[in-house]
Image: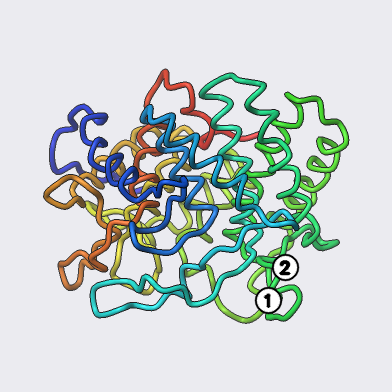
């Protein structure tokens, strides 16, 4: 891997996360929803990531409201309606629209509540609280696993399964793998034997699909390996481990990682994004690459506005931040990456270790 040179000496990271934390609190509504922006759209995955970040930063009351919101808004089939990133148009040249372009019952978005709840339990060690939210996780996985095929892959949404185009996404399935891992841990703590066995079977099938059945993904012809998340998520989620995971990252490192800047979001665009870079850093930490992860994280502190919040991404051909947005998920991803890097944090290994 190419060594990234730091542009400035690291300083105490906690202080630099105060503004991103404040932005999350400003985006969160009174009823607990954490949208993409203060006047924007919402999905359960990014909402849960925001709740985890607030927990890390000691904003426990805000995290409580976020979990209560999830519990209250879960649909009868166990899913949540959420907006999907690539369907949201630009309002103008520099800003994303705040209007929904259609919502989906996405399996990855739904499954991620298990990661958030396990993270919360590791932070608080409160078994009664874990029990309170367990029905939400159980219902979520009834929905998710109803869309797992006999081959082990999981369709990306109920709409795709029923109306088409039906497909399973490598990045989404990699993330669901992490969610299943956390659901297994929750079920084990609570002694929920039936679900524990079902989740272990599902995880084994999903691992088989992600490692040995590439034909089960991108079945509609789109080459999604141009997306960074499709590159690193099988390793971040734990389906690919150890030497194989390191080789997976090395294989495309020079394609996706731009020295002194960060990680491409899309291989074909001169655009690095802070959230993908933070997730790549978390992946590296889980594989023992703490030094290069620390360098990647440090570089992202160059990509902040004058108040200290993180921009969504940097278009390096034009030398400008684009779009001119500071999404909640970007702030949360950086908070969680810094937490994964810190030794001694109660939650440091939740995202950066695998079973």
Residue 222 position in % (x across, y down): 57, 79
Residue projecting furthest to the right = 194
Q: CA distance from mark 1 to mark 2?
A: 6 Å
Asked if residue 258 is positioned above or below residue 184 in the image, the reply reads below
Horizontal arrangement in the rendering, residue 223 relative to residue 341 (left or right): right
Residue at 37% across, 70% down: 98
Q: Is residue 142 left or right of residue 137?
A: right
Marks 1 and 2 in Cβ contact (< 8 Å): yes
* 130 horizontally vs 344: left or right: right
Q: Which mark is residue 190?
A: none
Within 10 Å of disc 1 (Cα), the crowding (few <14, some 14-19, many 20+) is some
**Residue under label 2:** 216
Element at label 1: loop
Q: Residue at x 33, y 71 (%)?
A: 96
Q: Position of residue 111 (x, y in %)?
A: 65, 50
Q: Quadrant of residue 173?
A: bottom right
Q: Which residue is mark 1?
A: 219
Q: Picture coordinates of residue 121 (x, y %)? A: 58, 26
Q: Please identify the quadrant where the C terminus is shown.
A: top right
Please report the residue visible at 23 percent of the width from the left and 74 percent of the height from the top: 94
Question: What secondary structure is marked by label 2?
Answer: helix
The answer to which quarter of the image holds residue 13 is top left
Q: Check the image and report above or below for 207 versus 131.
A: below
Residue 331 lies, in percent from the top left, at 33, 47
């Amino acid at each position: 891997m190419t060594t990234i040179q730091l542009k400035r000496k690291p300083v105490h990271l906690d202080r630099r996360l105060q503004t991103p934390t404040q932005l999350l609190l400003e985006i969160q509504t009174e009823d607990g929803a954490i949208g993409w922006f203060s006047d924007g759209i919402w999905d359960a995955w990014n909402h849960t990531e925001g709740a985890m970040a607030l927990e890390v930063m000691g904003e426990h009351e805000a995290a409580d409201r976020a979990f209560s919101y999830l519990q209250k808004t879960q649909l009868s089939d166990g899913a949540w309606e959420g907006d999907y990133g690539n369907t949201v148009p630009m309002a103008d040249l520099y800003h994303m629209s705040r209007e929904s372009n259609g919502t989906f019952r996405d399996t990855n978005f739904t499954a991620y509540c298990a990661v958030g709840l396990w993270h919360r339990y590791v932070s608080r060690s409160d078994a009664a609280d874990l029990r309170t939210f367990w029905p939400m996780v159980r219902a979520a996985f009834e929905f998710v696993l109803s869309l797992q095929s006999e081959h082990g892959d999981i369709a990306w949404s109920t709409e795709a399964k029923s109306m088409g185009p039906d497909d399973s996404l490598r990045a989404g399935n990699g993330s669901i793998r992490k969610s299943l891992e956390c659901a297994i841990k929750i079920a084990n703590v609570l002694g929920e034997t039936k679900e524990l066995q079902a989740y272990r079977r599902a995880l084994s099938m999903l691992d088989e699909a992600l490692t040995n059945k590439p034909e089960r993904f991108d079945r509609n012809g789109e080459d999604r390996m141009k997306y960074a998340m499709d590159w690193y998520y099988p390793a971040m989620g734990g389906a690919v481990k150890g030497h194989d995971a390191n080789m997976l990252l090395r294989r495309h490192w020079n394609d996706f990682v731009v020295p002194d800047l960060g990680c491409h979001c899309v291989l074909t665009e001169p655009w690095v994004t802070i959230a993908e870079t933070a997730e790549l850093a978390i992946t590296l930490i889980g594989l023992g690459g703490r030094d290069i992860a620390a360098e990647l994280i440090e570089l992202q502190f160059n990509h902040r506005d004058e108040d200290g919040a993180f921009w969504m991404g940097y278009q390096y051909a034009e030398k400008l931040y684009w779009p001119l947005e500071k999404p909640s998920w970007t702030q949360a991803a950086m908070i969680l990456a810094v937490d994964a890097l810190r030794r001694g944090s109660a939650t440091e290994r939740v995202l950066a270790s695998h079973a």
